[in-house]
Image: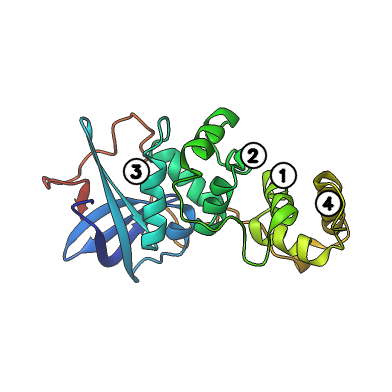
Amino acid sequence: MSPIARLTGVVAECGPDWLIVDVNGVGYLVHGPVDTVAGAKVGAEIALHTHLSVRDDGMTLYGFASADERSLFQTLIAVSGVGPKVALALLSVMTVDELSYAIASGNAAALSRAPGVGQKLASRIALELRDKLTAEPGPAGVSGDSSEVVAALMGLGYSQSEALEAVAKSDLPADAPVEDKVRLALSYFAGTPAGSRATSRTPARPACPPPAEAPATPADGETPYPIRASFPLDVCRS
């Protein structure tokens, strides 16, 4: 358990993948998934579930909109070769439910959609975690071959909601091979305007523009952004 499990304060600044949260006059530099950062507004109060990463070369604080998101982040970074940067990338392209389902179903192709996640690493994540997650074996109301069709569509880049919609609205013969069902589901997308169906999760633009000198996201194994004040965490005074 991280010694800093929750942070509540006012957003002082924000960038593409980071926030500075002012808590009683102390500014905490927090990195997080794109959706979490994009939903923040300067001057508004925010509550984050946090994880403190401690390394020999420094400390970095990560924040999440929900405890489930933080828990999945912690599960991901336990996999060899998966650092905080990769875990955040995965949580930025899929929701917690979509990511959990992709892993539980062994859908490495869906995982490889995230920046920095190659096919080899995606396969390792699916192999090591598919039996450790409590996700349902398939989305609600979908089972058997239909679940395989959903997984295949997600591997092609569609979101879980898009894949579920295609399966639900396509006339998929029960005795047809999975490959044929996937082709039929793809024909649904071909005949449906993009604006009339659920859209894929894409990184949203942050609600507040970054300052001229924004702290860079620390890459895995690199030194985090320098501490701005003499405080035993990666924080800065407002």
Q: Are marks 3 and 2 in contact (CB under 8 Å)?
A: no
CA separation in Å, label 4 and label 1: 14 Å
Residue 100's mark? none
Question: Which residue position holds label 1?
Answer: 156
| Residue count near mark 3 (Cα–Cα under 10 Å), binned few <14, some 14–19, many ≥20 | some
Q: In front: 72, or 203?
A: 72
Where is residue 147 drawn, in percent x and y?
A: 69, 54
Name the residue located 26 percent from the left edge and 67 percent from the top edge: 9
Of mark 4 and mark 1, the one earlier in the sequence is 1
The amino acid sitting under disc 4 is: Lys
Question: Which residue position holds label 3?
Answer: 215
Question: Which residue position holds label 2?
Answer: 109
Q: Are marks 3 and 4 in contact (CB under 8 Å)?
A: no
Nearer the observer: mark 4 or 1; the answer is 4
The amino acid sitting under disc 3 is: Pro
In the figure, 31 relative to 59: above or below?
below
Of mark 2 and mark 4, the one earlier in the sequence is 2
CA separation in Å, label 3 and label 1: 34 Å
CA separation in Å, label 3 and label 4: 47 Å
